[in-house]
Image: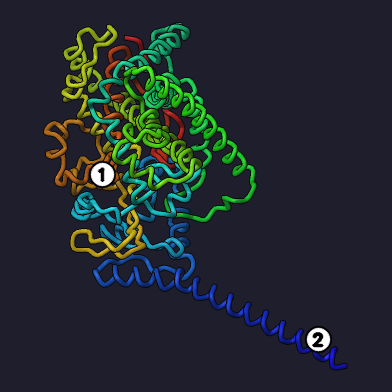
Amino acid sequence: MEGGEWVWQWQIITKEMVLSMAAIVASFMVVIIWKNMWLKPHRIRSVLQNQGIKGPKPSFLLGNLSEIKRIQSQFSNMSSSSQAEQWFHSLFPFLQQWRKQYGATFMYSTGHRQHLYVGDPKLVKELNRIRTLDLGRPTYITKALKPLLGGGIFRVNGPHWSFQRNLIAPQFHLSKIKNMVDFMEESTREIIRKWERIIEESGGKTAEIVIDNEMKEVTADIISKACFGGSYALGNQIFAKITALANLLAKRSVLFGFLYLRILPTKENKEIWRLNKEIEELILKVAHQHNLQNQMSKYQNQNHTKDLLQVILENTVDDDDSRRSAWGRILKKLIKRKSETQKMIVDICKSMYFAGSDPTALLLTWVLIQLSLHPQWQDCLRAEIFETFPNISSHGVFDIDKLRKMKQLSMVVQESLRLYGPAITASREALEEVKVGDMVVPKGTNILVFIAAIHRDREIWGEDADEFKPERFEGGVSEASKYPQAYLPFGLGTRICAGQNFALIQANIALVLLLANFSFSMSPNYRHSPFYKLVLFPQYGAPLLVSKL
């Protein structure tokens, strides 16, 4: 009897212990939820409110997500013709509405995340001046883009970002780009030969060509040669898979960090995992081939122009510290395991592929669309092209210095980037408290600059801000607008695009060659519908009528 009573008492004690532990865990979870869902957001909003920043009132769990959905729904109910006319506002109609209500700078919430919208050109100027690493990429965006960019330069912050930036940036210096001009030219001439065949097969002098796909083909070939040199054929395979991966991820909205079930074995996730594995295997295969070639060159005392992958390998896997840069020696201390080194190689290459190809292809696409709408500028550019390069039909005619002095071409490219730049937002997170001008931005705040809105602000650019007028850049960026620092085609601050010279030179070479061989006009099948998913692209493609000169 006493033994049974003891068992009974033990069961009671055990039950009480379990209940106590459950209560402790539940209390702990409540505290965490309260801290992350209310206390931190409330603290951030209080700091901003005390500085005069206003915004829509958020709900406890959803923030302003319900209001965002309602405003988007109202806009989507408009007629398709009205949407086409107001495509710019259709991207994020809630930002446009709140700007009217609360001014150029306001705050809003998506769930527990607090956002500071910066539309005041004076504050944008101050953001551009900040050089601290305490202003980095938002964590919610980096998580969403992890399958595409891994731990590459566009996702990481702090020392790893500094390493990659200092490793990559010198490879896109003008002195290095001069060694890439020949294959930039050859890749473009290949597409010219392809278009000539298409036009000939059409039986006339003109053919309809969907140029956005063609421009991707050109830029993919160029970045493959720049990154992988002699292994660019494998590089083109990698690009095709990265494009497929980007298309899958583009179905998700990453701007506001909505939650996705990324760990469940759904059909979409399985496809993402498969592509990631294949991309990694291909990149490591090319890296292994390069490493063997590097070792052979080392022992044979051969000197040749280095491609980007060779530079990456020397600073990650090479045991000879004398071949590493200063940042490469720092990286050796940061990375201890071989698997981490391999992952960094893969992630850097993935980032270079995505950033080095798609944005430049879209730049070319939007320029050719604008030139088709404004044929007088085609005539103007051809006159400049034939004056600068009278022997344009010959191979090897390009001189970077001459190319950069082509004023009319520069004006057209700059204006197209203003109106239809591939990157239409710049997002930052205050990893620590930072000061932007006189404003204190608390840790954890997500800052959003809507570049597309800044680039069309009439206060900055004048009443003709929505019009294609390259002549506004005749005196350069400094004279094109009231606030030159508000021209942000390649981002802002420390994280401005490291490869902008590379992108502009390959775009200029392509435009010179294409305009010297063809004229462009609008196809009746073209539907003007700029669409944003990761980058700004023509939603229904860009079919143009291409005529052989």
Cα–Cα gap, marks 2 and 1: 78 Å
- Residue sticking out furthest to the right: 1
In the picture shown, does residue 397 fall above or below 449? above
Task: Name the spot of residue 331 as percent of width and height, x first.
Answer: 37, 43
Asked if the residue at tag 1 contacts the one at tag 2, i.e. Cβ–Cβ closer than 8 Å, the answer is no
Total label count?
2
Query: Looking at the image, which residue is at 29% across and 19% down?
Result: 181
Which part of the image, by quadrant, shows the N terminus? bottom right
Q: Which image quadrant for residue 319?
A: top left
Q: Which of these two is toward me, 178 or 426?
A: 178
Q: Nearer the viewer, mark 2 or mark 1?
A: 2
The disc placed on residue 117 is: none
- Answer with left or right where residue 15 lies relative to residue 199: right
Residue at image position (32%, 48%) is 426
Marks 2 and 1, the one that precedes in the sequence: 2
Can residue 523 be seen here? The reply is no
What scheme was used to colour the molecule? Answer: rainbow
- Residue 7, label in figure: 2
Q: In terms of image quadrants, where is residue 55?
A: bottom left
- The image quadrant where one finds the C terminus is top left
16 in relation to 428, above or below: below
Identity, as a three-letter code, of the amino acid under mark 2: Val
The extreme bottom residue here reads 2
Asked if one can make out residue 293 in the rendered structure from this viewpoint, the answer is yes
Q: Which residue is tagged 1?
A: 456
Badge 1: residue crowd in 10 Å (few <14, some 14–19, many ≥20):
some
Looking at the rendered structure, the kind of residue marked 1 is Arg
Secondary structure at badge 2 equals helix
Which residue: 33% across, 19% down? 184
> Residue 127: x and y, percent?
23, 53
* Whole-percent x, y for residue 51 in the image: 24, 69
Q: Callout 2: 10 Å neighbours few (<14), some, many (20+)?
A: few
